[in-house]
Amino acid sequence: MPIAGSATISTLAIVVRDGDKVSGATPKRAVELLHLPMATEARRLNLTLETPATIRPEQNLQASRDGGPLPEKVQVLLSEVDSGVLSATDYQTPDPWQAFFGRKRYNVDQYDVFGQLIEGGGRLATLRFGGDGEDPSNTRGGKKPVTHVNIVAQQLQVVTLDKQGKGTLTLSIPAFNGELRLMAQTWSDDSFGAAERKVVVAAPLVSELATPHFLASGDQASLALDINNLTELPQTLKVDVAASGLVGLAGAASQTISLAKGARTTLQIPVTAKNGFGDGEVAVQISGLNLPGEPVRPSKQQWKIGFRPPYPAQTLNFDAVIIPEQPWQVAAAAFTGLDSQTLSGQLTLSNRPPLNLASYISALYAYPYGCLEQTASGLWPSLYTSQAQLSAMGIKTSTDDARRAAVDTGIARLAGMQRADGSFGLWGKQSEEEFWLTAYVTDFLLRDSEAGYALPDDLIARANARLLRYLKDPAQITARGAN
C-alpha cells in the first residue's frame, strides 16, 4: 500500500466471529489498533544552546547556537522560565518536530450495534467530578487577600539565523536566584527542532524573607530574613529594613552583622498589622558587600504581604416598600462593626418582588468550567437580557453584538458535545451519555432557535429523536441517569 504525505498512520483491524445457534454462542468481536511511525528523522533540526552554567542576577544572558549547517531561513524562538514553576506541573519543553511528526491520538469515532447483540454483565462505572460548589472554608474572613508572586517567564521575539546557522540571542535576567530553563524552538519551511538548557542564577549575597500567606488586622508576626554569604571572603554587612502600607515595624530598623565565608544567618523582623484591606510592603537594603576588583551596589529587595479582615464575611439585606414622597434610608447603626474598606453594595428598585436576579445572573456568568451544564447555564442570561438591562442591574457586560457572538460560540461548543446517537456528553462527544442534561440542553437549543439563532443542521432533530427514544424505551435511561 503506497503511503505519501503523512507523518504517522494507524492501522485499525476488526475481526467478527459469527454466533453458533447450536451451542448458543453469540457473535464475538475483536478490535486492534496499531501505530506505524514513518521515517522523518531527516526533517529534525539539531539545535544546541551554548550558555554559561551560572550567571548573576540583573545581567544579560547571551545564548548562541553553533554547530553544523542548517537549511536556509531557520528561525529560533527562545524562552526562559523558572525551573521551579515548570517542575510543579512536570512541564516538558515544547518540541515542534514531535508535534508534527510524533504519534497522534486516533481521533476517529467508531459506532456499531454489536453492543446490543453481545451478552454483557455488571454495571457501568460512575465517574465523579468536582462541581459547582465552593468549600465554605475558602471564604472565611471575607475578602481574600491579594497575593504577589515573583515568577520569571520571558520570551524573545523570533530570530532568524545566518547562512552558517549561527546566531546569538540576549536575555535580560531579573532580580532572581535559582535555576532557569532556557527553551528554544527552531523551524524552517519543512524541518523542525527544539533544545533546552538549564542555567543557575546566583548572587554573591542571597537574602530571602519568609512571610505569612496573609495577615489580619491587629496581628503580630516575626518575619525571618535569611542572608547567605556565597563569596569566598568574610563580610560585614549593614541591614536596613523599612515597612510601608498596612504593615509596621515593631523592632530595630537597622543592624550590622558579620558573616564568615559561606556562612548563613537568620534575622527576626517583628511586624504588626494595621487595620485595612490590601497590601503591606517590607523593603530590605543590604550594603557593605566587599568584592575586590568588582563594583558592588547595595542589594535592594521588596516583599509584599496581603492583608484581609480577621472576621467572616457578612451579607446584609434590607427590604422595604417605598412610599411616594417619603425618604427612605438604611440607618448608619446597621453598619456598626463593619470595615468600610471592604464594603460593597447594590441598590435595586423594582415594582415587583425583589428576587435578586442580579446575584443569580452574576453567578451564572462566573461559572468556571466548560462542561455541558455550565456551558448552557452560563448562556441563559445572554439569551433573554440586553446590555441596558444588565447595566441597570449593576452587572458589567459587553455589547449586545458581543454577547450574541458568545451565544453562537456556545451553540457550536454544545454541538461538539453531541454524541452519535443524538445525546450529549458532559465534556465532549466521547464522554458517557448524560440523560437529564440531554433534555436540559435540547430545551436550551430550542429556545435559541426561537430567538433567531442559527443552529447546525440536524442538531435539534437528532436530540429530539434521542428524547423520543427515552419515552419509548425508558430502559435506555440507566440507574445512574435516573438518580
Image (spheres, rainbow, N blue to C red):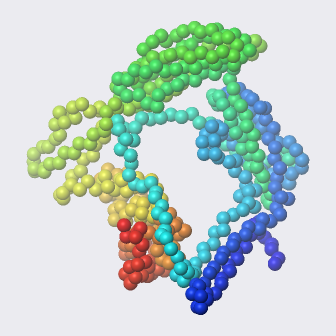
**Residue 310 point in image, percent of width and height:** 34, 31
Residue in the image at 67% along x and 13% along y? 289
**Residue closer to the observer: 422 or 381:** 422
**Furthest-bottom residue in this view:** 22
In the displayed structure, 232 sits above or below 377; it is above
Visible residue check, residue 282: yes
**Residue closer to the observer: 280 or 35:** 35
In the displayed structure, 274 sits above or below 149; it is above
**Residue 208 point in image, percent of width and height:** 58, 23
Residue in the image at 76% along x and 46% along y? 195
Left or right of 363 in this view: 413: right
**Residue 357 point in image, percent of width and height:** 28, 56
Residue in the image at 10% along x and 50% along y? 323
- Residue 263 occupies quadrant: top right
**Residue 101 point in image, percent of width and height:** 75, 61
- Residue 399 occupies quadrant: bottom left
Left or right of 303 in this view: 186: right
If the image is split into quadrants, where does the N terminus sit? bottom right
In the displayed structure, 327 sits above or below 229; it is below
Left or right of 408 in this view: 446: left
If the image is split into quadrants, where does the C terminus sit? bottom left
**Furthest-front residue in this view:** 23
Residue in the image at 47% along x and 28% along y? 212
- Residue 18 occupies quadrant: bottom right
In the displayed structure, 97 sits above or below 182; it is below
Visible residue check, residue 288: no
**Residue closer to the observer: 312 or 434:** 434
Left or right of 47 in this view: 87: left
Q: How many marks?
A: 0
